[in-house]
Image (cartoon, rainbow, N blue to C red):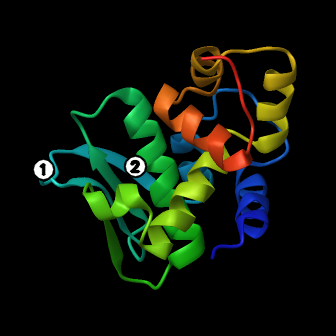
Amino acid sequence: MIDEIKIAKKADEVRGAKIKFPIDPIVVAKSLGVQVFTASLPRNVSGQIFYAEKKIFIEQTDFITRQTFSVAHELGHFILHNDGTSHTSPRNTTTSQGIDIKEIEANCFAANLLMPKDEVLHLVGLGFAVDSMANYFGVSSIAMQYHLNNLGVSAYV
């Protein structure tokens, strides 16, 4: 099991005190000295990070919301799993099923970086629908709904 509270705190630290939504994970990456590039990656790869070189590569043909989440996800690996080598984030059923602990942690980090719990709860309290919140945070409706589910919160669809 992952320590979601610890991961959320790390995301808060990395994001910083000044918050303007949507969060631009490329700006966050630059503040950490990490460069972000789009590239034509293999069909089954959504992102890669090279820790020592401080470089993230994401699939150039993905929708912007997917690219945003991919950058935040790779930053999660950089913060949580940096072993000085590299990491490739594949697109496959194992990652979507949430079996690999490192992928679960990187997804948790990305969700908390882009969609902080306090702000999500604030918007839910105001009656925002899922699509409106997704737009506000600059993420896909699927990512928004998944994060709401993980938080145990319901919102209008």
- Give coordinates of residue 81: x percent, y percent: 52, 77
**Quarter assignment of residue 62:** top left
Select label 2 or label 1 by which is in front: 1
Q: Name the residue: 32% across, 28% down.
A: 63
Please indicate, yes or no, whether residue 104 appears anywhere in the rendered image.
Answer: yes
- Along the line of sight, the residue nearer the viewer: 122 or 57: 122
Q: Mark 1 packing: few (<14 Cα in 10 Å), some, or many (20+)?
A: few
**Of marks 2 and 1, which one's residue comes earlier in the chain?**
2
Q: Which of 136 and 50 is in front in this view?
A: 136
Classify 5 as above or below 144.
below
> How many callouts does the rendering have?
2
Amino acid type for the residue under numbered disc 1: Arg
User: Tag 2: Cα neighbours inside 10 Å, few (<14), some, or many (≥20)?
Assistant: many
Is the residue under label 1 in contact with that under label 2 (CB below 8 Å)? no
Q: Quadrant of the C terminus?
A: top right
Q: Where is residue 124 in the image (x, y as percent from the top left)?
A: 79, 24
Classify residue 61 by image quadrant.
top left
State the mark number for residue 43: 1
- Disc 2: which residue: 36
- Residue at 55%, 26% in the rendered image: 138
Give how far across and how far down residue 83 sits, in percent: 46, 85
Q: How far apart are marks 2 and 1 (CA)?
A: 19 Å
Determine whether, in the image, residue 137 is placed left or right of residue 40. right
Which residue does the image show at 50% across and 78% down from the upper left?
A: 82
What number is the disc on residue 57? none
Q: What residue sits 58% from the left and 33% below the top? A: 144
Amino acid bearing label 2: Val
Q: In this view, does 74 lie above or below 62?
A: below
> As drawn, is 124 to the left or to the right of 63?
right
